[in-house]
């Protein structure tokens, strides 16, 4: 699959991820960046989402969405577009993170609510949303493992005194500073022991390579909503 020729259109070619994907495409050799492509890739901003969805639907082009910080309206727009074209939504296109999400769900299922779950993430100083989309995706994986709703069982931004952790909740902590590409830890804290699943992104190149793998997966797929788990399963 890695040798198949592919043309990718970027909605934000001059953004951080746009430049990283352009560099990764040059290294790949079988991938070309163009104004019109086999797959449209959007790593931009929430306010640009509707334009990308409209462009994909109008041209019948599969769409990879790597933008985070979307609201319920964005979720609904994506679901509607996925009825007409193939859409892959990924808070994180790293293949390592996709595997980490799977492990998180398994661990949450096996360990149960006797083990507290805390998700800690750190990103560069300019990241505008918190918790990160990846942290939230890991939280969703943990909630799925427990068979509960993350919206009803999460704790964020603790501040003050007299705080008592609610049993069964999933906690989030967000750190910002420097040029950190992305660090994520899922901490399972049980009686007298801890299990920590960690992922460290050393460069945006890993997300760019994962985005190209996801774009290859999307090429030729029927309409529907896909995830990085589908990419990993097909590898």
Image (tube, rainbow, N blue to C red):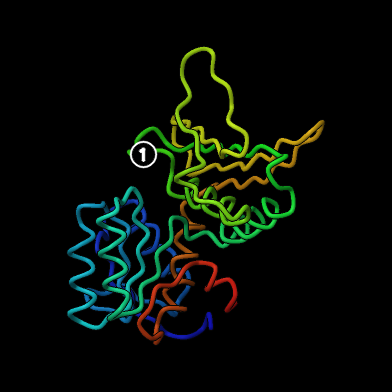
| Horizontal relation, residue 47 to residue 15: left or right | left
Q: Nearer the viewer, residue 183 or 46?
A: 46
Where in the figure is residue 142, as x and y percent of width and height?
59, 51
Q: Is residue 205 left or right of residue 74?
A: right
Residue ranking furthest to the top: 161
Residue 129 in the image: x percent, y percent?
A: 35, 40
Residue 176's spot in the image, x, y percent?
A: 44, 31
In this view, 182 is above or below 99:
above
Q: Give the residue drawn at x 38%, y 78%.
A: 224
Residue under the image location 50 percent in, 44 percent down: 182
Which is nearer the eye, 63 or 166? 166
> Looking at the picture, how far across and down is residue 30, in whole percent?
44, 80
Q: Quadrant of residue 128?
A: top left
Secondary element under disc 1, as helix, strand or loop, is: loop
Quadrant of the rendered image containing residue 157: top left
Q: Please state, as top left, top right, bottom left or bottom right, where the C terminus lies in the image.
A: bottom right
Total residue callouts = 1
Check the image and report above or below for 155 versus 138: above
The residue drawn where x is 55% and y is 47% is 202
Q: Which residue is mark 1?
A: 127
The extreme right residue here reads 192
| Residue count near mark 1 (Cα–Cα under 10 Å), binned few <14, some 14–19, many ≥20 | some
Q: Looking at the image, which is closer to me, 81 or 169?
A: 169
Query: Relative to 143, does residue 40 appear above or below in the rendering?
Result: below
């Amino acid at each position: 699959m890695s040798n198949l020729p592919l043309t990718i259109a970027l909605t934000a070619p001059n953004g951080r991820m746009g430049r990283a994907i352009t560099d990764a495409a040059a290294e790949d050799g079988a991938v070309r960046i163009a104004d019109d492509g086999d797959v449209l890739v959007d790593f931009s901003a929430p306010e640009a989402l509707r334009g990308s969805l409209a462009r994909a639907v109008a041209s019948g082009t599969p769409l990879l969405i790597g933008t985070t910080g979307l609201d319920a309206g964005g979720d609904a727009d994506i679901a509607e577009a996925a009825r007409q074209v193939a859409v892959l939504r990924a808070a994180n296109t790293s293949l390592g993170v996709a595997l980490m999400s799977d492990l998180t769900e398994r661990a949450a299922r096996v360990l149960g609510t006797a083990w507290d779950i805390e998700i800690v993430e750190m990103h560069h100083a300019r990241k505008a949303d918190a918790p990160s989309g990846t942290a939230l995706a890991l939280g969703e994986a943990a909630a799925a493992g427990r068979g509960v709703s993350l919206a009803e069982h999460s704790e964020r931004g603790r501040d003050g005194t007299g705080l008592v952790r609610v049993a069964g909740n999933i906690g989030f902590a967000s750190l910002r500073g420097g040029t950190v590409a992305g660090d994520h830890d899922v901490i399972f804290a049980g009686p007298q022991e801890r299990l920590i699943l960690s992922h460290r992104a050393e460069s945006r190149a890993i997300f760019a390579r994962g985005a190209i793998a996801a774009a290859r997966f999307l090429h030729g797929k029927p309409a529907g909503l896909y995830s990085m788990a589908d990419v990993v399963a097909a590898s």
